[in-house]
């Protein structure tokens, strides 16, 4: 049996090749994502471990900053001298750093990274642990000199002597490049500007006595833990945070962890789609191979092979396929990881491929996925093979299972589908976001399974409709192509299922994204009343001089400031909630339309008052007049009175969780030093909006980090952010389509082999080569469009249910992108034509007499 299995595997290696490609793609994405994420993690572990001082002292941060407020926590620079006198300290120095600056060149173009990496201004105080070294020029001296990292200089073609403008919280200032520094470690993509220490303190932090942290080196023989204990005992534990080199490195890695996790999970998402669609392909391939080998399997049974041996033979073939596919996939995954590293390097994050990490878990995961997928996918066909009787060797027909009833599929599919429909119905009727999202996930999984199980039941009614025009358009060739697709509903359903999965995903996400876009459009139309909004491109705060410049622009009338600050509120139900609150000028009503359930803007923005979202207030037993303890950064605490409850029924940005906002006077009293995040600008009476826009753009030309947006621009900005998610879904769809095309090609290729004698007879009675190719192409098109129709129908249901979940967050509009749906159906027909090219060509080149004699 082992010899027979090996011979069978080698005999069918061409037919198994396309299935092996599905395994290769699955394994490549799994192994590539693991290698890439492990390499990134190891690289940054080394970076942070090699540059962290023995002990870092920083201001205690009690609140997490979900939205940047523009405040920089500082401590006295003189603390370094006090720390230096502590027993066990070898050296102590202050650091003055700001990672929210903007650096512009002589043309007022930002020289910073365009990938979201920060532009960091800091003091030049090199040590053996500095991540850079001075490679040309000299160290900065005085307020007009600076060093720039070599990668930014190369990217922006900057040289020694070139002028730069630094836009920092205290104000803008001019510097000249007097030196270039080169990274000795991995550059995470940041732009680095070094100033001499006094300049960094005054120009970046606004005070000659301020610092952002103290770096401490241990004396010889003193461990980091001992150093931490001694310094914290000398300074006290209530005011500052103390982190050893290991703790600081871990903290830095944790901050970067979100980005690394996103990269990893996106990659694993591609792997998951490849695995799911690959399973359909492998099941179909083995089912067809077993159907074609009915006589062969019957002979084995007649010669004495029992059911277990036949089943084991098929599973051994699957395992061999998995081993080969996993090995090739692992190699492909390494190449994919190299490509991703090169892509990161192109975006400014320099990672050396020589430092690529291939942990023991990667090949284990690769072979578990590859072998596991093929083994599981081949199990049902293997059981079917074991059921072939010895008498099948004497039968004329080699195609098994065509006429079997689909009762079991109907019952199981109906039960699973009913459970999925009930979950989706529960999702639509739920009033809690968490439970609705859970029911949506359950409903999606169950309805997908139900459609896969019951798909063959839908083949005959749907394909009769989809191919109904074929006989009239293409004559007998069209009729035969339709009947070929109807001949084996199980096979047609399994082939279409691979395409259906990807299209269901894109259909659902297209509806969800279109609904989000329309909801935000409606909210912007309903809420935003200003002529223009001035904002940072990355929604980061900007310095006061930008606000002053806008106010001084000719034609600018009312300017309302918006500012954010992290807060913690203690609610009447005992919960402490950390969130981000907003502060506004008193004229908020003139630039925004806010719906209040109780109170008004004057009450909300009055000194000592705040506004809160109605639903959040009800959930925590808050009402107008309630006194709410509020904690700000730096440990400042107060009690504010609830002056108004808003009923915006939207996610309009007037805060985050809780929708808390208050007057800027309240915010400046308890959280001083913040920067504005947005300016809402109305034209002065008699000033044309276009003229004001031109004036604002000219005024803000020296500040490349901020843009002027009107209502349409604001909508485009939101659409672009939503589109990022949609592009990811389209990429997943592309992968699913690639594997689905392989499935259609495989099905048609095996079908051509299966129908060799039939094709020979058709050619013998006058069917031309062109007609034969057209027949196979039409069969492929109707299968592909069938998969598209099922997938889009399922995706539309998922999308509508997803919109109902979004409605619980205030995104109430439902939009169905009919243009995208029509394009997908047309695209599916094209996919069918492309998939049929090779099988149709092969069929048309058959020798007629040899085909008729084929058994």
Image (cartoon, rainbow, N blue to C red):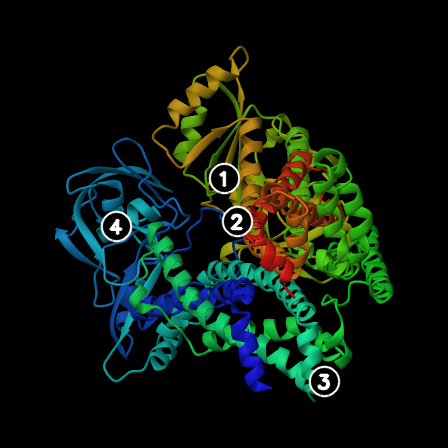
The tag earlier along the polypeptide, 2 or 4, is: 2
Residue 236 spot, x, y in % from top left: 42, 72
The tag earlier along the polypeptide, 2 or 3, is: 2
Check disc 3 and report its element: helix, strand or loop.
helix
Tags 1 and 3 touching, CB below 8 Å: no
Where 640 falls versus 597 (above or below)? Answer: below
Q: Residue at x 42, y 29 (%)?
A: 548
Give the residue at mark 4: 151
Give whichever of 253, 259 is nearer the camera.
Answer: 259
Q: Is residue 178 in view from this perspective?
A: yes
Mark pair 4, 3: CA separation = 73 Å
Residue 233 spot, x, y in % from top left: 39, 77
Tell us which disc is closer to us: 1 or 3.
3
Looking at the image, residue 113 sits to the left or right of residue 558; the answer is left
Give the residue at mark 2: 67
Q: Residue at x 46, y 76 (%)?
A: 363
Give whichever of 584, 310 is nearer the camera.
Answer: 310
The crowd level at tag 4 (other Cα within 10 Å; few <14, some 14-19, many 20+) is many
The tag earlier along the polypeptide, 4 or 3, is: 4
Looking at the image, residue 8 sits to the left or right of residue 644; the answer is left
Mark pair 1, 3: CA separation = 81 Å
- Identity of the residue furthest to the bottom in this view: 304
Residue 176 spot, x, y in % from top left: 19, 40
Tell us which disc is closer to us: 2 or 3.
3
Residue 740 spot, x, y in % from top left: 60, 55
Tell us which disc is closer to us: 1 or 4.
4
Tags 1 and 2 touching, CB below 8 Å: yes
- Identity of the residue furthest to the left in this view: 137
Check disc 2 and report its element: helix, strand or loop.
loop
Check disc 1 and report its element: helix, strand or loop.
loop
The tag earlier along the polypeptide, 1 or 4, is: 4
């Amino acid at each position: 049996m082992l010899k027979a299995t090996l011979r069978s595997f080698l005999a069918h290696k061409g037919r198994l090749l396309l299935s092996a490609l599905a395994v290769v793609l699955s394994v490549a994405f799994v192994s590539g994502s693991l290698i890439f994420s492990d390499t990134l993690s190891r690289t940054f572990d080394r970076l942070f471990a090699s540059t962290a001082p023995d002990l870092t002292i920083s201001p205690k941060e009690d609140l997490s900053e979900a939205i940047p407020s523009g405040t920089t926590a500082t401590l006295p620079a003189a603390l370094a001298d006090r720390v230096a006198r502590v027993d066990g300290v070898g050296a102590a120095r202050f650091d003055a750093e700001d990672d929210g600056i903007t650096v512009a060149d002589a043309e007022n173009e930002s020289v910073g990274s365009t990938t979201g990496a920060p532009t960091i201004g800091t003091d030049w105080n090199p040590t053996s642990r500095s991540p850079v070294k001075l490679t040309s020029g000299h160290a900065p001296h005085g307020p007009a000199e600076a060093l720039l990292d070599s990668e930014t200089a190369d990217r922006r073609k900057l040289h020694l002597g070139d002028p730069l403008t630094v836009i920092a919280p205290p104000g803008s200032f001019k510097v000249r490049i007097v030196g270039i520094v080169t990274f000795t470690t991995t550059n995470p993509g940041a732009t680095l500007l070094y100033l001499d220490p006094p300049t960094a303190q005054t120009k970046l932090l606004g005070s000659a006595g301020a610092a952002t942290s103290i770096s401490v080196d241990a004396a010889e023989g003193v461990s980091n833990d001992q150093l931490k204990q001694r310094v914290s005992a000398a300074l006290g534990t209530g005011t500052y945070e103390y982190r050893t080199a290991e703790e600081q490195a871990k903290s830095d890695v944790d901050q970067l962890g979100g980005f690394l996790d996103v990269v990893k999970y996106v990659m694993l998402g591609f792997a998951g789609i490849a695995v799911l669609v690959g399973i359909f392909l492998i099941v179909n391939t083995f089912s067809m191979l077993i159907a074609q080998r009915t006589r062969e399997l019957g002979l084995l049974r007649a010669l004495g092979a029992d059911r277990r041996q036949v089943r084991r033979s098929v599973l051994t073939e699957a395992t061999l396929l998995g081993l080969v596919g996993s090995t090739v996939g692992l190699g492909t995954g390494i190449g994919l990881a190299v490509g991703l590293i090169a892509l990161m390097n192109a975006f400014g994050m320099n990672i050396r491929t020589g430092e690529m990490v291939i942990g023991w878990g990667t090949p284990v995961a690769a072979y578990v996925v590859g072998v596991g997928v093929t083994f599981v996918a081949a199990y049902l066909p293997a059981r079917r093979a074991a059921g072939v009787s010895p008498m099948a060797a004497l039968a004329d027909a080699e195609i098994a299972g065509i006429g079997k009833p689909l009762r079991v599929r109907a019952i199981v599919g109906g039960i699973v589908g009913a459970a999925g429909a009930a979950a989706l119905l529960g999702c639509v009727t739920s009033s809690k976001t968490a439970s609705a999202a859970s029911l949506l996930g359950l409903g999606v999984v169950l309805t997908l399974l139900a459609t896969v199980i019951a798909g063959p039941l839908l083949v005959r009614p749907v394909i009769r409709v989809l191919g109904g025009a074929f006989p009239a358009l293409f004559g007998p060739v069209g009729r035969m192509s339709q009947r070929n697709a109807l001949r084996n509903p199980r096979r047609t359903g399994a082939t279409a299922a691979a395409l259906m999965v990807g299209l269901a995903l894109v259909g659902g996400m297209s509806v969800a994204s279109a609904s989000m876009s329309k909801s935000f459009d409606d909210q912007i139309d309903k809420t935003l009343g200003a002529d223009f909004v001035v904002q940072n491109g990355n929604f980061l705060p900007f310095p006061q001089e930008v606000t002053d410049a806008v106010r001084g622009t000719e034609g600018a009338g009312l300017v309302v400031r918006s500012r954010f600050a992290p807060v913690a509120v203690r609610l009447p139900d005992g919960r402490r909630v950390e969130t981000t609150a907003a502060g506004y000028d008193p004229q908020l009503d003139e630039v925004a339309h806010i719906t209040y359930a109780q109170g008004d803007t004057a009450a909300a923005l009055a000194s000592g008052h705040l506004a809160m979202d109605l639903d959040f207030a009800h959930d925590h037993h808050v009402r107008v007049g309630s006194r709410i303890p509020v904690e700000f950064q730096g440990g400042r605490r107060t009690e504010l009175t609830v002056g108004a409850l808003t009923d915006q029924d939207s996610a309009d940005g007037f805060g985050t969780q809780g929708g808390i906002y208050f007057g800027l006077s309240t915010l400046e009293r308890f959280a001083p030093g913040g920067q504005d995040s947005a300016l809402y600008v109305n034209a002065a009476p008699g000033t044309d909006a276009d003229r004001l826009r031109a004036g604002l753009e000219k005024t803000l030309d020296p500040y490349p980090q901020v843009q002027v947006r009107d209502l349409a621009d604001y909508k485009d900005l939101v659409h672009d952010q939503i589109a990022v998610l949609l592009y990811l879904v389209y990429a997943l769809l592309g992968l699913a389509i690639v594997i689905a095309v392989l499935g259609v090609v495989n099905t048609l290729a095996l079908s051509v082999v299966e129908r060799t004698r039939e094709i020979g007879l058709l050619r013998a009675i006058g069917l031309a080569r062109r007609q034969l190719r057209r027949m196979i192409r039409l069969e492929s098109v109707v299968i592909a469009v069938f998969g598209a129709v099922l997938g889009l129908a399922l995706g539309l249901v998922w999308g509508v249910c997803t919109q109902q979940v979004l409605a619980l967050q205030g995104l109430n509009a439902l939009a169905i992108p009919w243009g995208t749906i029509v394009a997908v159906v047309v695209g599916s027909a094209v996919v069918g034509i492309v998939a049929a090219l090779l099988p149709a060509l092969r069929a048309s080149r058959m020798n007629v007499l040899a085909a008729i004699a084929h058994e």
